[in-house]
Amino acid sequence: MIRKIILVLILVPLALAIAVFAVSNRAPVLIAFDPFGAQPPMLGFSVPLYLALLGALILGVVVGGIASWGAQRKGRRRARRAAAELKAAHAELAALRKQREPARPAAPPATSSIASIAYRHPSAA
């Protein structure tokens, strides 16, 4: 419940700030991908300023996430190897415990105490 309240307290003002930013920055800007600077640019288009900035922000988050995921590759590989070694160690431990455990003979059928008192084996006397 508290988590939802905190989420609302953060997301609602953030959404309002983005909406105000978008409304106040609607002027078109020219985005050009022309390394030689020709006038007019060979490859360019006009978009509202807020779309250009929000697009750059989203692209930065995606590229940063991919970069950090790639940087963690060694740790993930090490964790997978450790998990495989742990699984093998558990299997080996179970096999050794099974091997160490002596073969238990089958337990004799349980007799009631009354039957054991009433019947005495001749060699027991």
Image (spheres, helix red, strand yellow):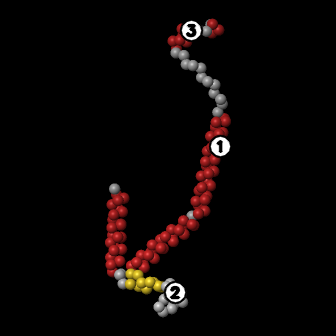
- Viewer-proximal residue among 22 and 85: 22
Q: Residue at x 42, y 79 (%)?
A: 52
Instruction: Identify the amino acid type marked 1.
Output: Glu
Q: Secondary structure at mark 2?
A: loop
Q: Position of residue 46 (x, y in %)?
A: 42, 84
Q: Position of residue 31 (x, y in %)?
A: 45, 84
**Image disc number at residue 119:** 3
**Image disc number at residue 74:** none
Instruction: Identify the amino acid type marked 3.
Output: Tyr
Labels 2 and 3: the sequence-earlier one: 2
- Viewer-proximal residue among 108 and 62: 62
Labels 1 and 3: the sequence-earlier one: 1
Q: Nearer the viewer, mark 1 or mark 2?
A: 2
Q: Secondary structure at mark 3?
A: loop
Q: Is residue 73 above or below residue 125?
A: below
Q: Residue at x 51, y 12 (%)?
A: 114
The CA span between labels 2 and 3 is 108 Å
Which residue is denoted by mark 1 in the rendering? 92
Instruction: Identify the amino acid type marked 2.
Output: Asp
- Viewer-proximal residue among 33 and 64: 33
Which residue is denoted by mark 2 in the rendering? 34
Q: Residue at x 35, y 66 (%)?
A: 11
Q: Residue at x 44, y 75 (%)?
A: 55
